[in-house]
Amino acid sequence: MPVLNIEVPEEICHCYQTIDILKQTICEDFVASEYQKANISIRQGAKMLGLTYEEFMVDFLGNRQISFINGTPQELEMELQQENAWLDKALGNRI
């Protein structure tokens, strides 16, 4: 795994009790950002942070108010139409 060394201003370091807490915060923020940009999946993010799939979705993303549904409005609309068509067929148009 590549190692990245960064310089963090003293003013920011003082906001954290330990360097390990600062490192964890930086890592979590990076994973959240990459997930929102669709560069990593839920499973990849969970693995990077040592969380289960469910912990990543519910706790990690939920606490940050980040949606676990990634898609453009057009993709989500198409998915909704597909779900509605499936429901109509499954219920025999008895809605």
Image (cartoon, grey):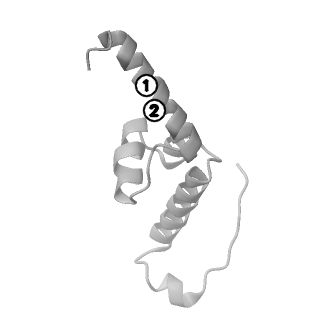
* Residue 49 in the image: above or below residue 26: above
Element type at mark 1: helix
Name the residue beneath numbered marker 1: 83
Is 63 positioned to the left or the right of 77 in the image? left
How far apart marks 1 and 2 lie (CA) works out to 5 Å
Given residues 93 and 57, the one toward you in this image is 93
The tally of labels here is 2
Q: Position of residue 33 (x, y in %)?
A: 57, 59
* Residue 3 in the image: above or below residue 80: below
Crowd tier of the residue under label 2, counting other residues whose Cα lies within 10 Å: few below 14, some 14–19, many 20 or above: few
Element type at mark 2: helix
Name the residue beneath numbered marker 2: 80
- Residue at image position (56%, 54%) is 36
- Residue at image position (32%, 14%) is 93
**Dots 1, 2 in contact, CB < 8 A:** yes
Q: Is residue 44 visible?
A: no
* Residue 67 in the image: above or below residue 83: below
Given residues 63 and 25, the one toward you in this image is 63
Crowd tier of the residue under label 1, counting other residues whose Cα lies within 10 Å: few below 14, some 14–19, many 20 or above: few
- Residue at image position (41%, 52%) is 61
